[in-house]
Image: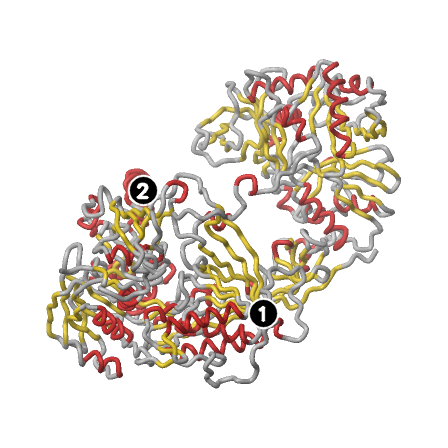
């Protein structure tokens, strides 16, 4: 019998219980405590996936989150999650998992033909297709898009809940291996509020596969006791929780998996929780990741990391193979060999690339197995499963029969979070490891992720860091309020005082630093060995199996001139897959360094970016989905509009009706009807969303003169003016009207979308530029609601309500339906129009009275569509369309409106010569020459193939007459009236001939709204 | 995300604050000197501490002068800016 199987006994799985799961439609059985990978191995399944590019058969390489090969889709429907690592997916009853990158089946995959043409798709293949002529890309794209990619995106909406939670602590420990447990325990005993996050479902890390005694207890018992002690001390222990990202000022994000991928959550419905933790001190104890070895066909099912093989044997009670060849450059793999042998495997040979090895564990292995020093693995034999190994021992070939190759190329400390926190690294040439050097934030790395080796050293390192962190924690000081504004305080953390002073003495109750009694407690004596032995086929020696990057690919990239590590990474895609190169990056770097003849640290590292392991987007979104994605701002008339069930237009967080269509009307028809009603009779619209500010005090006029670019000081009480506001660089950011309500009291309006920005701007002028002004500014955007009544019959409609409507740009106070209102005469539509302001809570009743009056005069409601048609025809600019933050008042035809003597924000910049160049893009009108709508956003070209000279900012049609019109910004625009241009929109697939005209299409004299 | 100790509200998340501009970029609109206009486009952005204007936009709305390191984001000083009137 060969291949993987369940061992007769052993492991931490619950053999008394059986759970069923399916993989590629086949139903299997496993035990609680298994991962999908261990359960598949237990069922004799070693082929778990196909590779990304060449579709080569792949098995599981690792036993944790670093797994590059065994990626599966887990779950069904809305719970489906692609690219889940089989070694990081704990088995649950009913798990449905499918393999990826294969068609029609895992065993027979047509895409594997890619491996036959591998020499045609080497490193940078995709890259080269981009460089080639564009027509060639059109041929490639179709093929590439189908063949490339990992997994398939879910097609159904997420069904479960994801939440965000904030937390504070004195000490956050990431990782609950021996170092992390010791650190958390020391910190908690020191009185600190502790959060301990462990990505695994169990605490213990490497101890779960170890035989060591700690404080005289078997490792598992010590873990259990420590967990109980942490709970008693009030520490928050989060299992299945990964520290994903390390951000500024000691903020970290953790992802807590409440259920496994694809698993239905319980009654809470909660699938995952994203924690945002602000920590006083952070202790990183994330361990180290074993590196593979470069040899031919090192990606075959049956090639596994030695440490992973040990975990499968010890923790899961699974034999990943029967006849094992161990290849190593360190002592740690010997522990794996001993564990595999104890579990029932035959150790065919241990191939050690070192020329000398003499530690206790090596001696123990030599007594039982064939150990070859100065031995290099050349290739794995077999097709879909390892059948043997070819090696060279002291220059002589050696052929071995085996079904498992357990390889260890040394250890890479997990420095991801240390680096995300801005830290620096040291390089150890002997072991080939980058270890944390300088920490830029309040953090320290301990244990294996700091390059420590041997259980005693790791425990001591963690314990010391925990003690120091607790001593530095504010909670442990005598006066220690939690930060104002609080958060979650771990109750009792300070209440249970630690027994003081015992320090180092080992105690029966574990009060001091934990002491290990391990059989082989020492360094791994790793001797980094990067060069593949002569005879290794570099084209099948995979550095990054997840992205199918071989040693030959790296060499090719180097020959083609990709010398920078950043270029090499992008060109070959090394380390750019979902595992982010956890097992592969360093091997690739070392290969580049060799080619360059430089030490590894000089070649440099690529940037470590969050998240540490793949994160589902739903966790990042949290509760912010659907209606909860953004707040909904309702005008006081929202329910009245909603009764019409109008199509809504989001404007910032506001929702405004686009139109009030009648039965059978399209949106465009409704908009046109409503606009015509304004041109011919009267219409009314809710304009409550406008930004509104009251500015009062002796210096109110002076403040407005700073903010507004138009003259304000001479404005008489009871009068208003149109105005624009500029940024410091002279660009228009908003427009509105300013009204003098009293001697020292003004009302300033701004656009709907600009209201929030104007709050900040007014505050800036008030507090920073003119701190000495005696003036108060209040945003009354939601205090006041407003309705605009516009049309030739608007005056008549209001006059019927016992109101004396003011003259154009005048204001009066009065009553409508017995409620106080402020009536401003200002026109956006081009017709005579009035804006009626009232306290928001009164507005629905006023609206009803106005609606009766408007209806009586043959008019009705209008929405944003009609408003757009009206203002475009009138040539009125709009924030967000013409006012896009890139144009001066001069560009927008407002030069004459400016205050000549300056003194307003943006005035100094307007003097810059570049802002008055004649070829600047300036406002024009556009008329379609052959009919047909002008596409909004279209480029303006003088002829096909020419450079764009401007663009269409808003488009519509004449309201009462025929013809399609638009506003646009065109280089030297006003001087080009009469020219014919093309308005071309590739995205809409439309090109229209337009002639350039003045930007006012209707009533240019303004006769219709003046008195 | 930074932790900013507002003099009124205590340590609060950066999400509550609006970064406004470097203090050196706050020019009075009556200052039409060439140097000021040039400063609109030529900021030093040194790899060093710099004084910046922040606003506690979703809090007490106070204006703060914050001395922050442009590389490490270390905040050396936070001062309240008060209108004198």
Relative side of A664 to B85, left or right: left
Residue A275 screen position, x and y as percent = 52, 57
**Figure check: A447 above or below A647:** below
Mark-to-mark CA distance, 1 and 2: 54 Å
Q: Indicate which disc, 1 or 2, sits on the residue closer to the N terminus.
A: 2
Q: Is residue A999 visible?
A: no
- The quarter of the rendered structure image containing the N terminus of chain A is bottom left
- Quarter of the rendering containing residue B39: bottom right
Residue A560 screen position, x and y as percent = 29, 58
On what subunit does the disc labeled 2 rest? A
Q: Residue at x 14, y 58 (%)?
A: A382
Q: Residue at x 76, y 33 (%)?
A: A841
- Could you say which disc has been placed on residue A493 in the image? 1
Give the labeled residue for mark 2: A145
Q: Residues within 10 Å of mark 1 (few under 14, many from 20)?
A: many
- The quarter of the rendered structure image containing the C terminus of chain A is top right
On what subunit does the disc labeled 1 rest? A
Q: Residues within 10 Å of mark 2 (few under 14, many from 20)?
A: few
Q: Secondary structure at mark 1?
A: loop
Q: Residue at x 71, y 13 (%)?
A: A858
Q: Nearer the viewer, residue A768 or A528?
A: A528
Q: Nearer the viewer, residue A320 or B58?
A: A320
Q: Nearer the viewer, mark 1 or mark 2?
A: 1
Q: Is residue A89 visible?
A: yes
């Amino acid at each position: 019998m060969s291949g993987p199987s369940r061992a007769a006994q052993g492991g931490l799985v619950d053999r008394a219980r059986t759970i069923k799961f399916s993989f590629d439609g086949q139903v299997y059985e496993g035990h609680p405590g298994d991962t999908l990978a261990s359960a598949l191995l237990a069922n004799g399944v070693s082929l778990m996936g196909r590779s990304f590019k060449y579709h080569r058969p792949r098995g599981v390489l690792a036993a944790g989150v670093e797994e590059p090969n065994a990626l599966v889709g887990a779950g069904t429907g809305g719970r489906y999650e692609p690219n889940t690592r089989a070694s990081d997916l704990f088995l649950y009853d009913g798990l449905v998992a499918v393999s990826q990158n294969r068609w029609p089946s895992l065993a027979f995959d047509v895409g594997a033909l890619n491996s036959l043409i591998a020499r045609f798709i080497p490193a940078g293949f995709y890259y080269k297709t981009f460089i080639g002529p564009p027509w060639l890309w059109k041929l490639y794209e179709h093929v590439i898009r189908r063949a490339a990619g990992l997994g398939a995106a879910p097609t159904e909406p997420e069904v479960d809940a994801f939440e965000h939670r904030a937390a504070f602590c004195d000490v956050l420990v990431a990782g609950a291996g021996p170092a992390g447990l010791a650190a958390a325990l020391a910190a908690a005993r020191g009185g600190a509020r502790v959060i301990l996050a462990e990505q695994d479902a169990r605490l213990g890390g490497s101890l779960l596969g170890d035989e060591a005694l700690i404080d005289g207890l078997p490792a598992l018992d010590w873990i259990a006791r420590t967990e109980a002690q942490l709970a008693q001390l009030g520490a928050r222990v989060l299992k299945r929780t990964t520290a994903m990202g390390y951000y500024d000022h000691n903020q970290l994000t953790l992802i807590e998996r409440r259920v496994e991928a694809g698993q239905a959550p319980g009654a809470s419905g909660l699938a995952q929780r994203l924690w945002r933790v602000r920590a006083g001190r952070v202790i990183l104890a994330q361990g180290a990741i074993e590196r593979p070895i470069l040899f031919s066909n090192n990606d075959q099912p049956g090639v596994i990391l030695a440490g992973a093989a040990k975990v499968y044997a010890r923790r899961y009670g699974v034999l990943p193979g029967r006849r094992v060849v161990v290849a190593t450059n360190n002592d740690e793999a010997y522990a794996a060999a001993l564990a595999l042998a104890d579990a029932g495997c035959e150790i065919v040979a241990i191939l050690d690339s070192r020329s000398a090895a003499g530690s206790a564990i090596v001696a123990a292995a030599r007594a039982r197995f064939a150990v070859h020093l100065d031995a290099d693995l050349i290739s794995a034999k077999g097709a879909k499963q390892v059948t043997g190994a070819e090696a060279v021992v002291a220059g002589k070939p050696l052929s071995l029969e085996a079904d498992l190759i357990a390889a260890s190329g040394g250890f890479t400390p997990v420095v991801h979070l240390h680096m995300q926190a801005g830290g620096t690294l040291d390089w150890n040439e002997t072991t080939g490891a980058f270890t944390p050097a300088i920490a830029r934030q309040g953090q320290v790395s301990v244990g294996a992720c700091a390059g420590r080796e041997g259980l005693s050293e790791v425990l001591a390192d963690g314990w010391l860091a925990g003690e120091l962190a607790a001593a530095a924690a504010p909670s442990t000081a005598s006066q220690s309020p939690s930060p104002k504004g609080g958060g979650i305080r771990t109750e009792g953390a300070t209440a249970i005082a630690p027994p003081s002073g015992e320090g180092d003495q080992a105690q029966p109750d574990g009060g001091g630093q934990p002491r290990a009694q391990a059989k082989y407690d020492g360094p791994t004596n790793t001797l980094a060995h990067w060069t593949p032995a002569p005879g290794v086929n570099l084209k099948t020696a995979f550095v990054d199996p997840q992205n199918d990057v071989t040693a030959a690919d790296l060499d090719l990239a180097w020959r083609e001139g990709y010398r920078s590590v950043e270029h090499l990474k992008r060109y070959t895609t090394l380390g750019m897959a979902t595992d982010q190169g956890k097992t592969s990056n360093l091997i690739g770097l070392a290969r580049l360094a060799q080619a360059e003849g430089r030490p590894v640290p000089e070649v440099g590292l690529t940037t470590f970016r969050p998240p540490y392991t793949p994160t589902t987007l739903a966790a990042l979104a949290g509760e912010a989905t659907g209606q909860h994605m953004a707040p909904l701002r309702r005008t006081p008339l929202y329910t009245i509009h909603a009764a019409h069930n109008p199509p809504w237009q989001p404007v910032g967080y506001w929702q405004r009706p686009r139109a009030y269509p009648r039965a059978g009307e399209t949106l465009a028809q409704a908009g046109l009807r409503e606009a015509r009603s304004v041109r011919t009779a009267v219409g009314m619209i809710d304009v409550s969303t406008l930004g509104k500010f009251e500015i009062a005090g002796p210096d109110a006029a002076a403040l407005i003169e700073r903010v507004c670019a138009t003259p304000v000081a001479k404005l008489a009480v009871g009068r208003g003016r149109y105005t624009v506001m500029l940024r410091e660089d002279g660009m228009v950011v908003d427009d509105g009207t300013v009204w003098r309500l009293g001697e020292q009291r003004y009302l300033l309006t701004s656009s709907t979308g600009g209201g929030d920005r104007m709050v900040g701007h007014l505050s800036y002028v008030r507090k920073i530029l003119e701190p000495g002004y005696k003036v108060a500014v209040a945003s009354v955007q939601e205090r006041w609601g407003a309705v605009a009544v516009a049309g030739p019959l608007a005056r008549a409609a209001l006059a019927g309500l016992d109101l004396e409507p003011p003259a154009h740009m005048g204001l009066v106070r009065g009553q409508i339906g017995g409620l106080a209102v402020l009536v401003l005469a200002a026109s956006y539509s081009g017709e005579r129009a009035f804006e009626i302001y009232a306290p928001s809570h009164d507005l629905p009743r006023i609206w009803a009275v106005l609606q009766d009056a408007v209806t009586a005069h043959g008019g009705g409601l209008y929405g944003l569509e009609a408003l757009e048609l009206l203002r475009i025809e009138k040539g009125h600019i709009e924030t967000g369309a013409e006012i896009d933050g890139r144009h001066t008042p001069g560009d927008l035809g407002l030069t004459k409106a400016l205050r000549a003597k300056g003194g307003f924000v943006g005035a100094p910049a307007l003097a810059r010569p570049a802002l008055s160049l004649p070829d600047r893009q300036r406002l024009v009108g556009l008329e379609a020459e052959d009919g047909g709508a002008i596409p909004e956003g279209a480029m303006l070209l003088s002829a096909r193939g020419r450079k764009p000279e401007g663009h269409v900012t808003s488009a519509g049609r004449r309201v009462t007459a025929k013809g399609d019109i638009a506003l646009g910004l065109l280089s030297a625009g006003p001087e080009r009236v009469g020219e014919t241009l093309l308005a071309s929109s590739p995205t809409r697939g439309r090109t229209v001939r337009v002639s350039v005209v003045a930007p006012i299409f209707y009533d240019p004299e303004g006769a219709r709204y003046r008195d | 995300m930074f932790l900013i100790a507002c003099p009124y509200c205590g340590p609060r998340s950066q999400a509550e604050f609006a970064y406004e501009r470097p203090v050196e970029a706050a020019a009075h609109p009556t200052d039409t000197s060439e140097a000021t206009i040039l400063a609109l486009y030529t900021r030093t952005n040194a790899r060093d501490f710099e004084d910046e204007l922040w606003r506690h936009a979703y809090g007490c709305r106070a204006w703060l002068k914050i001395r922050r390191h442009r590389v490490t984001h270390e905040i050396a000083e936070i001062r309240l800016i008060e209108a004198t009137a």
